[in-house]
Every structure is written in structure tokens, then in C-alpha cells.
Image (cartoon, rainbow, N blue to C red):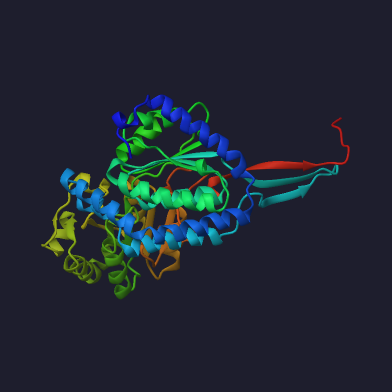
């Protein structure tokens, strides 16, 4: 990725050219056959595996630069690639290739008394702008999802993953060329200058139809504040895990450790543990001992610290903090109602889970909590498009308009109406 000086051109002019190329590519892509898109995606996956050593070498440079810059362990984990993660990236692209092509899918159809036949069908959004930080795998996920859904995409990754992103992007271009699709269907912004983001948020003279930000609170806040085009907001994952009085203790212990510690740096990691006060004497300490033994720092309310002295005091700020690290805040609540009240107050409306055997408590939790993803007796770490069978995701949308939850191929489409008549005129 070039610096502003290396680019040797005006940022606004550069971004305008990228937008124009994306618009030119979007037309052929929108009508590309399912077979051609499938072939491109399969070739992309093969190119990712073939370029594995090149990707790892580039990622090593990014990691060294990030460590020198003092990035947190959570951010380093998001940035790091290994053979397993590259393999998973390629598998995700293959999974997207095998999904049903959404473009042209009939969503609904009906007949009117006057004989008109009306059809609602899926169409691509057009051109998607994706602005993201740290995660180089987003390059492959976003590129593949946009291709499958018939959208051109402009990718603006973070400077910390610039080397990795460039090689992954090269593998995607290989796939496009192999299938005879326009290479400008997937573009990366080749400069790290923040002014490029500003140009994307302006819409590139009508050449961006939707923006998807994926990163920290400050990035998402800037996008939501400055964007002149629609935004699918991926806010922080302030995820809650509630242990009900009816919870099976062995299950609760297993899920709590997984929800927090499997990978602490992802948006689906649990950040707050809520335990029903009715089972504090039996459930709280075993769960917290498991978390502590797994290397997690416990920050608890005064009640929690009385029962588990190893916990550090939780401040008011802890209840609204996305740690992305081996830290969890813990509180006791009065049943499912108390859990709902706490979550309503502090949640980012991303993902919440309840561990319970009481069907009434589960239904109340599901009905009264307004978050994008709700789970029963399962880890919050399942908040992932791949785990939902979507192949991958661009992000977890926490807004309420159009896309919500994992943003996969269907969420990257809109629709149009086709009306078929046989000479009708309106009286």
C-alpha cells in the first residue's frame, strides 16, 4: 500500500478514479452468471492457498510494525495470520461459492384482480464501500461476499494490515481474471491517508451506494457522523452472557469459558457475565474459578467480590466496555427480569445469550431483548456469519434498517418489482 507521497497524486482525484472504475465494473458484474461468479470464487480460494507463503511473509511485516507501534494483544490477535487462518479464509470463500446465488431470486409474487402479475426479486446494491481495521481476512470475506451478490466493492483496510491486505487482494484479482470478470469489481484503496476515508464517506460522486464500517467505536462514530450514503453499522460487541437459576451448572461453566476465552479479540466474545442472584451460592464461584484458571481477569460488583474475593472491583465504566481481552465484568441480577434490565441499559445490541432450562425465562429473554443476535444454551462466539451458514460475513450489523446481524450475500442485495400485464390501463 502506498503512502500519500508515493501515490504521487491528489487523494480526491485518486478516489474519484477508483469510484468511476467501480461503477464501470458494477454493470457487467450485476448481470454475471452464477456459474461465472462461482468459477471466480473457486479460483480465489485456490489462489489464497497457493500464495500462503507470500501472505505469511507480508503478515510478518505487518505484525512487526504493529508490535513496534504498541498495538494491544487483542489487536495483534486480530491481525495475525497463520496457515490455519489462511486455510479458514479459503474455506470461507469456497463456502460462499457454494451458496445459492441471490441475484434474481424471487422473494414474492402475487396476482392483482386486474390481471397484473407482480414479482419482487433480489438485485445487487451496486457498489459497496467497506472500511475496516486490523483484520486482513475481511479483505477476502468482503470481496467474496460482494462478488457473489453481484456488487462491486471498494475496500479500505487499516494501515496496520496493509501488507497482508495487498497480497490477499492480489489473490482475489487472480480469481476475477480467471473467470473473465472485470478486475475493478474488487478494488483496494492504495493509500493510508485518512483523507481517502473522507472521500468514500462523501460517496465518490454517487459511486458508492452503501458504506460498511468494521472497526473500533471511533471509526464507526466517524462513519455514522460524516457519511452521505447509507451505512450498515457494525458497532462494538458488548455481549452479555446470563446464567439463569434454571441453568445446568456444567453447561454454564463450559459455555462461559468458551464465550469469553476461545478468542477474546472478536466481537462475539462475552464481555459481561450476569448470574441470577438465586443461584449465586451454587453457580457463581465455580464459573468464576474456571474463568480465572483459564487466565481471565474478573471485575465484579461488590456482591460478587464478597463471594469471590479474587475479583477486582468493577467500575461503572466496566459495564459498557468492550475489553477484547482476557477481562470480564460480573454482576448478580434478580432473575431474567434483572438481566433484561441490565442488558437494556448497557448493551450495544450485538449479541446476548441465556443459559437456562426454563422455557418461560428463555422466551421472555428472546422477546424482550432487542439485540441483533440472541442465543439459548450456546456460546456468544457463534455470532458469526460462517457459523450461521453464510460462508462468511462483512460484519454484524447492529442497526435496524435493511441489514441486521451477520451481513452476508442476502443482506448485500436490495429488490425491485417486476410487473407483468397484458394491456391493462389504469382508470
Q: Quadrant of residue 157?
A: top left
Which residue is situated farthest in the bottom direction here? 250
Choose between 292 and 325: the one closer to the eye.
325
Q: Give the residue drawn at x 37%, y 31%.
A: 196
Quarter of the figure that contains the N terminus:
top left
Choose between 5 and 33: the one closer to the eye.
5
State the image coordinates of residue 346 (x, y, percent, origin top left).
31, 46
Choose between 170 and 134: the one closer to the eye.
170
Q: Give the residue drawn at x 33%, y 60%.
A: 242
Which residue is situated farthest in the right direction here? 423
Query: Is residue 24 in sight in this rendering?
Result: yes
Choose between 263 and 348: the one closer to the eye.
263
Image label count: 0
Q: Give the residue drawn at x 45%, y 43%.
A: 399
State the image coordinates of residue 34 (x, y, percent, origin top left).
62, 54
Query: Is residue 134 in sight in this rendering?
Result: no
Residue 184 vs residue 52: left or right? right
Q: Give the residue drawn at x 66%, y 41%.
A: 416
Q: Quadrant of residue 299?
A: bottom left
State the image coordinates of residue 396 (x, y, percent, origin top left).
42, 50
Residue 281 vs residue 417: left or right? left
Q: Is residue 358 above or below residue 194?
A: below
State the image coordinates of residue 328 (x, y, percent, origin top left).
22, 56
Quarter of the figure that contains the C terminus:
top right
Amino acid at each position: 500500500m502506498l503512502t500519500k507521497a508515493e501515490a504521487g497524486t491528489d487523494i480526491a482525484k485518486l478516489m474519484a478514479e477508483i469510484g468511476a472504475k467501480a461503477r464501470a465494473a458494477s454493470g457487467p458484474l450485476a448481470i454475471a452468471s452464477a456459474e461465472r461468479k462461482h468459477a471466480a470464487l473457486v479460483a480465489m480460494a485456490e489462489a489464497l492457498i497457493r500464495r500462503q507463503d507470500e501472505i505469511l511473509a507480508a503478515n510478518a511485516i505487518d505484525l512487526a510494525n504493529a508490535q513496534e507501534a504498541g498495538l494491544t494483544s487483542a489487536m495483534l490477535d486480530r491481525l495475525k495470520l497463520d496457515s490455519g487462518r489462511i486455510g479458514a479464509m479459503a474455506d470461507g470463500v469456497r463456502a460462499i461459492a457454494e451458496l445459492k446465488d441471490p441475484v434474481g431470486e424471487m422473494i414474492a409474487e402475487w396476482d392483482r384482480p386486474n390481471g397484473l402479475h407482480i414479482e419482487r426479486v433480489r438485485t445487487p446494491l451496486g457498489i459497496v464501500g467497506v472500511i475496516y481495521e486490523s483484520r486482513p481476512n475481511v479483505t477476502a470475506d468482503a470481496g467474496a461476499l460482494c462478488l457473489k451478490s453481484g456488487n462491486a466493492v471498494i475496500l479500505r483496510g487499516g494501515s496496520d494490515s496493509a501488507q497482508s491486505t495487498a497480497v490477499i487482494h492480489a489473490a482475489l484479482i487472480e480469481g476475477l481474471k480467471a473467470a473473465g470478470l472485470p478486475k475493478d469489481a474488487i478494488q483496494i484503496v492504495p493509500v493510508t491517508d485518512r483523507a481517502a476515508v473522507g472521500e468514500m464517506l462523501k460517496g465518490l460522486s454517487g459511486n458508492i451506494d452503501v458504506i460498511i464500517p468494521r472497526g473500533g467505536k471511533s471509526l464507526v462514530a466517524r462513519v455514522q457522523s460524516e457519511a452521505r450514503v447509507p451505512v450498515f453499522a457494525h458497532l462494538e460487541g458488548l455481549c452479555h452472557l446470563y446464567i439463569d437459576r434454571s441453568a445446568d451448572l456444567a453447561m454454564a461453566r463450559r459455555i462461559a469459558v468458551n464465550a469469553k476465552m476461545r478468542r477474546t479479540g472478536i466481537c462475539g466474545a462475552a464481555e459481561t457475565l450476569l448470574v441470577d442472584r438465586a443461584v449465586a451460592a451454587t453457580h457463581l464461584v465455580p464459573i468464576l474459578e474456571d474463568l480465572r484458571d483459564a487466565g481471565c481477569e474478573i471485575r465484579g460488583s461488590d456482591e460478587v467480590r464478597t463471594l469471590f474475593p479474587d475479583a477486582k472491583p468493577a467500575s461503572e465504566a466496566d459495564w459498557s466496555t468492550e475489553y477484547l481481552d482476557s477481562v470480564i465484568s460480573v454482576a448478580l441480577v434478580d432473575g431474567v427480569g434483572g438481566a433484561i434490565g441490565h442488558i437494556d441499559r448497557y448493551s450495544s445490541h450485538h449479541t446476548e445469550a441465556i443459559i437456562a432450562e426454563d422455557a418461560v425465562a428463555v422466551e421472555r429473554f428472546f422477546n424482550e431483548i432487542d439485540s441483533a443476535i440472541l442465543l439459548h444454551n450456546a456460546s456468544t462466539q457463534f455470532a458469526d456469519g460462517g457459523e450461521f451458514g453464510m460462508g462468511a460475513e462483512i460484519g454484524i450489523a447492529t442497526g435496524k434498517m435493511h441489514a441486521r446481524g451477520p451481513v452476508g450475500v442476502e443482506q448485500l442485495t436490495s429488490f425491485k418489482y417486476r410487473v407483468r400485464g397484458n394491456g391493462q390501463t389504469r382508470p
